[in-house]
Image (spheres, rainbow, N blue to C red):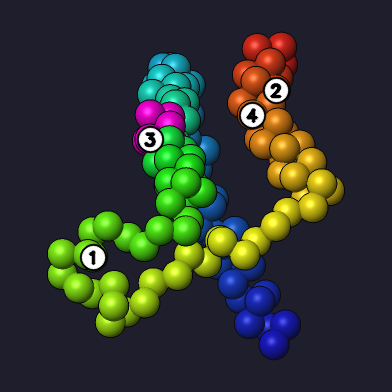
Amino acid sequence: MEEQFKNIDKLTKKLVKEAGIHKPSANFLNNVMSVVEQKSIKRVYEPLISRSAWIVIGVLFVASLVLLYFYSSSPFILFNDLHLSQKLNFQNPFSAIEFSKTTVYAIGFLGLFLIQIPFLKRLVEQRYL
């Protein structure tokens, strides 16, 4: 096995001697650096879901929770004309839920935390980037 590597070593030494030492052109470094600078363009971060889409999603979510709260005891009006409410018997899944004070505080602090994240992110970007 070592003999195979000796033959390869001898062959590579012979090829290097035959090829000789070639010097690059005078502008080689400048040409390489210009290509590197062109390819190293920074990409601007684009979120998958835009800010306006998140606002619309949030408004729809809050509106649906408010509607569920106010219309929790009455059946859905949409199905009265079709008489589906008698067949399907819809019930509000949130009507029996009662939150303790600890849960309400936890949800409130979580909301405050989620509101603070964009402000803290912007502050860190301004100071350190």
* Residue depth check, mark 2 versus mark 4: number of the one nearer the observer: 4
Real-space CA distance between mark 3 and mark 4, rounded to the nearest whole angstrom = 16 Å
The image shows residue 50, relative to residue 20, as above or below, that is above
Q: Assess disc 3: are there few (<14), some (14-19) or many (≥20) residues with their C-alpha within 10 Å of its C-alpha.
A: few
> As shown in the figure, which amino acid type bears the numbered disc 2?
Leu
Residue 16 in picture, x, y percent from top left: 53, 52
Residue extending farthest to the right is 102
Per the image, the residue denoted by label 4 is 115
Closer to the camera, 72 or 17? 72
Left or right position of 88 against 62: left
Task: Say which of marks 1 and 2 sits in front.
Answer: 1
Magenta residues (range): 51-57
For the view shown, which residue lies furthest in the left direction? 82
Horizontal side of 94 relative to 82 (left or right) equals: right
* Image depth: mark 3 or mark 1 in front: 1
Residue 65: % across, % down: 49, 47
Q: Depth check: 117 or 125 in front? A: 117
Of label 3 and label 4, which has the lower sequence position? 3
The Cα atoms of the two marked residues, 3 and 1, are separated by 27 Å
Disc 3 is placed on an element classified as helix
**What residue is disc 3 on?**
56
Q: Which of marks 3 and 2 is in front?
A: 3
N-term-proximal mark, 1 vs 4:
1
Label 3 with label 2: CB-CB less than 8 Å: no
Name the residue at 70% across, 22% down: 120
SS for dot 4: helix
Q: Is disc 2 placed on a helix, strand or loop?
A: helix
Residue 79: give its label. Answer: 1
Q: Main secondary structure of the magenta part?
A: helix
